[in-house]
Image (cartoon, rainbow, N blue to C red):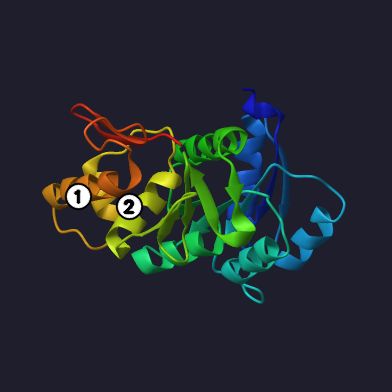
Amino acid sequence: MNFEDYHILVVDDDQRLRDLLARYLSENGYLVTAVASAEEADEHLSMVSFDLMILDVMMPGESGLEYAKRLIQSGSTLPILFLTAMSDTEDRIRGLEIGVDEYLPKPFEPKELLLRMRAILRRQKTIPVDKKNQNFYIGKWLFNIQKNTLKDNEKTVSLTSSEADILKFFLGRTGDVVSRDQILKHVGGASSARAIDIQITRLRQKLEDDARQPKHIQTIRNQGYILWV
């Protein structure tokens, strides 16, 4: 998969950061268009096809959250990576509930941005997603991130808020190994790595056909967990 064939739309009112991102991504082979507002982004989206949007959350006028919500409700399937100074779990979950693909808190390492972009672009090729209806497909299950439910052809299973938060966190990193500490840092409702293990066990009991031999949430010895869809 050649990531350098992709066209990226950067939307950020901070000219310095916008110029730095445009230059850095261009140096790494991406075609980049950088704009300062949702209004400018709309103009380009009406004329050009993009593969990924990097969107600042805190913009004057129409905020990144408002703009992302409007795009997704209009039926757009363009993946969105939020750049945000906000670190509160509630804010991150709000973005996921809207339907964005990933958060990257400021300040960030440029290399991490590239890795997260590549993960999103890779998932776009492999994960069936119905963002308009807030649904993500995990095997036979349809995960609704607003209702916190798993549904198949036979039944609907309710998730606790902690279980749903963990699953949302995994969805942002499908196919990547995540440590217990990473989950603990980004997901509320757990106070220790052991508490994360307990939540994973309960989530497997709902998600897996056989929780003792999981196909979706697998343990990577001495590293953490990985989600396969």
* Residue 25: image location, x then y, percent: 62, 37
- Mark 1 near mark 2, Cβ–Cβ under 8 Å? yes
The residue lying at 76 percent from left, 67 percent from top is 39
* Residue 63: image location, x then y, percent: 61, 71
Q: Nearer the viewer, residue 225 or 185?
A: 225
Instruction: Name the residue tied to disc 1.
Output: 196
* Residue 12: image location, x then y, percent: 63, 59
The residue lying at 54 percent from left, 69 percent from top is 58
The quadrant of the image that shows the N terminus is top right
| Relative height, residue 15 to residue 224 (above, below) | below
Q: Please report whichever mark, 1 or 2, sits nearer to the chain's N-terminal start.
A: 2
The residue lying at 45 percent from left, 66 percent from top is 147
Residue 181 appears in the figure? yes
Q: Nearer the viewer, residue 107 or 181?
A: 181
Secondary structure beneath dot 2 equals: helix
Checking the image for residue 166, the label placed there is 2
39 displayed left or right of 181: right
